[in-house]
Amino acid sequence: MFNAGAYAQPPPATAYLCAACGEETELKPKEPVRCKTCGHRVLYKKRTSRMVQFEAR
């Protein structure tokens, strides 16, 4: 029997931008939300580079 949990990869770190210093910070899922440079707690998630399009009626 195949156990998918044994081969699962950990989720990748996500890139965020600090609201205070503008530095890019990568956070893993269980890390506290805090800039690694200045310690500020307001971070903005970076926009995706792929095309996102919605259909409105």
Image (cartoon, rainbow, N blue to C red):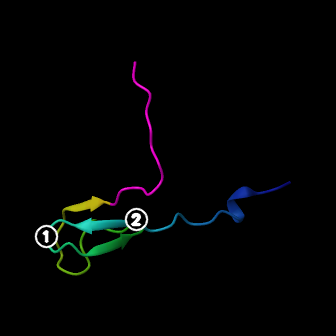
Q: Amino acid at mark 1?
A: Ala
Where 28 sits versus 57, above or below?
below
Q: Residue at x 36, y 56 (%)?
A: 47
* Mark 1: few/some/many CA within 10 Å (<14, 14-19, 20+): few
User: In the visual, does 25 lie left or right of 12?
Assistant: left
The region drawn magenta spans 46-57
The residue sitting at the left extreme is 20
Where does the image place residue 53, in percent across and percent down from the top left? 44, 38
Label 1: which residue? 20
CA–CA distance between discs 2 and 1? 22 Å
Q: Quadrant of the N terminus?
A: bottom right
Label 2 vs 1, first from the N-terminus: 1
Which quadrant of the structure image shows residue 21? Answer: bottom left
Query: Is residue 49 a member of the stretch shown in magenta?
Result: yes
The residue tagged with tag 1: helix, strand or loop? loop
Closer to the camera in the image, 46 or 49: 49
User: In the visual, does 20 lie left or right of 25?
Assistant: left
Q: Residue at x 24, y 75 (%)?
A: 23
Q: Residue at x 68, y 59 (%)?
A: 5
Q: Amino acid at mark 2?
A: Lys
Q: Are marks 2 and 1 in contact (CB under 8 Å)?
A: no
Closer to the camera in the image, 56 or 1: 56
Where does the image place residue 56, in percent across and percent down from the top left? 40, 24
User: In the visual, does 24 lie left or right of 5?
Assistant: left
Query: Is residue 31 a member of the stretch shown in magenta?
Result: no
Q: Quadrant of the C terminus?
A: top left
Closer to the camera in the image, 52 or 15: 52
Which quadrant of the structure image shows residue 13? Answer: bottom left
* Mark 2: few/some/many CA within 10 Å (<14, 14-19, 20+): few
The residue tagged with tag 2: helix, strand or loop? loop
Label 2: which residue? 30
Which quadrant of the structure image shows residue 9? Answer: bottom right
